[in-house]
Structures are given as C-alpha cells and as structure tokens.
Image (cartoon, helix red, strand yellow):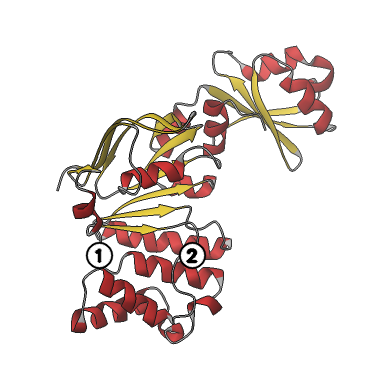
Amino acid sequence: MSALAIETHQLTRRFGELVAVNRLDLAIPTGTIYGFLGPNGSGKSTCLRMLTGLLLPSDGRVTVLGLPVPKQAEALRRRVGYMTQRFSLYEDLSVRENLAFVARVQGLGGRQARQRIHELLTAHDLTALSGQLAGSLSGGQRQRLALAAAVVHRPDLLFLDEPTSAVDPENRRDFWEKLFDLCDSGTSIVVSTHYMDEAERCHGLAILENGIKRADGSPEQLMNNLGATVVEVLTSDLRELKRALLALPGVQSAAQLGLRLRVLVDGRIEQPVNWLREQLPARLSEAELILVRPSLEDVFVSCTGGHS
C-alpha cells in the first residue's frame, strides 16, 4: 500500500456557476485519522463524494489507496467504507438483518458473514439489540449500527460524513474511541465535522471555507502557527466592550465565554496586552488581561476571517 491513503492535486468541482471545491491539494498518510473542518456549505461532503468516486471532479487529479479515481472507482469500492450523515440503513429490518444484508452486498457469505456479524455486534455493543428493528433505535444506537455496517468488510479506508451530528456528547466520545480502535488496527479514516472538539482529535486536519482549503496540518501545528495572539479579558460590560474591540483594526475577533472575552489580536502586534490597554484606556485600565494558549476555534476564526 502507498504511504499516502489519499493524494489530490488541484481537485475542483463546479455546479454551474458555483465552485463547491476549489483546487484542493491533499496528501493524507495511511493509518491516520484526517478531518475536514468547516461550516455547512464549505465543500466537505462534496470532497468526500469525489474521493469515494461517487461524484466526478470538474478538474484535477485524485489517487485513493494507490488507485486513480474515478477511473478505478469500482475497484476502490471494495476497499473503502462510507458512513453518511443521515442514517441510511433499512429501518424495517433488525440490527442483525441489516448487517447480514450489507455483508452479502460486500461479498461475505455463510460462515464468514456470521462470524463477522458476531464480532461487530460484540464490538459495537449491539448484541442485546440484534433482533430490534433499526427504526426503533436511539440516535447513539443507530450511529453504532451504521459504523458497524460501514466496516463489515474490513475496509482499508473509512469515510465518515459528519457522523455524530445527531448524538449526545457521551455517544460522540464513545464513537471516537471506536474510531481510534479502527485506526490502531490499520484502517485509515477521513471524517468531516463542524465540531471543534472532534477536529482536535484528528491526526491531521484541513480547514475549508467556501470550497477553499484555508489551513492544513496537525491540530497542534495549526494552533502553534496561529497568526494571532489570544488575550482573555475579565471585566464588566462585556457586550459593549466587545463592540469597541471589534472596531479596532488589530483585533481579529472577540467572543464571550462566560464572564470573559476571548480576543484575537493580530500576531504582528507586540505586547498585545499593553496595546489593548492603550487603545481603550477608559475601558481596560482596571480590567484583568491574560495571555492564553490558542485553541482550534481560534485558528478557525483567524484563517477564515470570521468574527465571533
């Protein structure tokens, strides 16, 4: 297998006048969890569909698991798994029946299928639910079933399109533990998300905005290379202070977190705490200002130009 699970060069997709993905370059190593982070409409799902061969690119080149896509998309399908954002299994079939159907589609039969289904029911805590109709499952249970179905054929590469958008934080955490187990066993994973805490779990990450890759690297690298300084401000009248801060040309964003404001100051400004006090002496002379470590949300706001 290639050292890269996925490689793209100038990958582009247009829908009429709309450029959904714009000249995207990727180099995703095997054996890692790689994330696409961005809001709705940023091109995440379009990109995943091109990488799986479900959607033809308008321009550019794609290689997945060493196979050119879409030319060898059919050969690729046996080696990848795909979990859609919406639950796509049969609600009028039981958990076991759904897994048996997917196993048959993937070419598993008889004893091999029965053994694999038993493994998946156990690994995904579905044994007690095996006879229950999929349509009656909770959000977290459906998510576990969908993941089990996506890996029934032991794919080399797994694609997940916002897989945790409809589940609670505890189920999201458990789901990610399953992903790390899969990755540890050799499965490469590509996941799209708009949750910052999920993006921080990825080994590598691309931040997308309007189909354009704004940043690429490990979460730690992205936070260390942030072109801004983060200052937290503790004082009164935070809403009025926020408006005043956003009017300053050197302030990239300001967001309230409880009793504090989290302020991104242009990285070219030296001594940002003193600079803020000088800009708004009447409001900040008695306030508490502290330099803090950047977060991935700070990176997202900084590189996309969004203001909180």
Residue at the left extreme, as displayed: 1
Q: Quadrant of residue 68?
A: top left
Residue 293 visible at all: no
44 over 189 or under it: above or below: above
178 over 224 or under it: above or below: below
The three-letter code of the residue at mark 1 reads Arg
Relative placement, left or right, of 36 versus 30 is right
Q: Which mark is residue 154?
A: 1
Q: Residue at x 74, y 18 (%)?
A: 247
Percent coordinates x, y for residue 75 in the rendering: 18, 54
Q: Residue at x 61, y 15 (%)?
A: 271
200 over 16 or under it: above or below: below
The three-letter code of the residue at mark 2 reads Phe
Q: Residue at x 42, y 67 (%)?
A: 146
Q: Secondary structure at mark 1?
A: loop
Q: Which mark is residue 87?
A: 2
Relative placement, left or right, of 276 versus 109 is right
Nearer-N-terminus badge (2/1): 2
Residue at the front extreme, as displayed: 16
Relative placement, left or right, of 226 versus 112 is right
Percent coordinates x, y for residue 33 in the rendering: 35, 49
Q: Secondary structure at mark 2?
A: loop
Question: Does the CB distance between marks 2 and 1 fall below 8 Å?
Answer: no
Q: CA distance from mark 2 to mark 1?
A: 20 Å
Q: Quadrant of residue 101?
A: bottom left
**Location of the C terminus (image quadrant):** top right
Percent coordinates x, y for residue 225 in the rendering: 44, 26
Which is more toward the observer, 256 or 146?
146
Percent coordinates x, y for residue 190 in the rendering: 36, 49
**Residue depth check, mark 2 versus mark 1: number of the one nearer the observer:** 2
Which is more toward the observer, 229 or 198?
198
